[in-house]
Amino acid sequence: MKRSKIIGLLIILTGILILFYKEDEFYGWGGYVDKSWENIIISFILIAIGVLFVKKSNRIN
C-alpha cells in the first residue's frame, strides 16, 4: 500500500471515531451546550480529507 493510502485510511478511521464519540453535555451561560454538531462537522471534514488522500494514491498508480 502506498503511504498516502495508509494515511488516508487512518484519517477516515479517526473521523468515524469522532462521529461516534459521546461527550457529556453541560449547562453553560447561554443554556444547554451540546457538542454533537461540532463532532459531526469535524468528522465530515476528516472523512473528506481521508477520501481525497485515498483517491490521490489510486490516481498515482
Image (tube, rainbow, N blue to C red):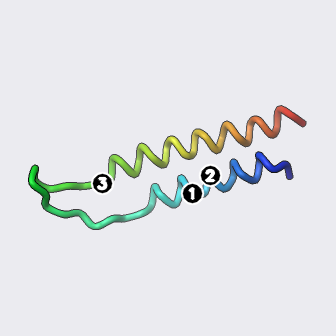
Q: Amino acid at mark 3?
A: Lys
Query: x, y (%) of residue 3?
Result: 81, 50
Using a 10 Å C-alpha cutoff, classify the residue at mark 3 as few (fewer than 14 neighbours), some (14 to 19) or many (20 or more).
few
- For marks 2 and 1, give the CA distance: 5 Å
The residue positioned farthest toward the top in the image shown: 59
Contact (CB < 8 A) between labels 2 and 1? yes
Q: Secondary structure at mark 2?
A: helix
Query: x, y (%) of residue 11?
Result: 62, 51
Q: Which mark is residue 11?
A: 2
Name the image quarter holding residue 54: top right
Q: Amino acid at mark 2?
A: Ile
Q: Amino acid at mark 1?
A: Thr
Which residue in the structure is indicated by mark 1? 14
Which residue in the structure is indicated by mark 3? 35
Please tell me whether residue 59 is drawn above or below residue 54 in the rendered image. Answer: above
Q: Could you tell which of marks 3 and 1 lies nearer the N-terminus? A: 1
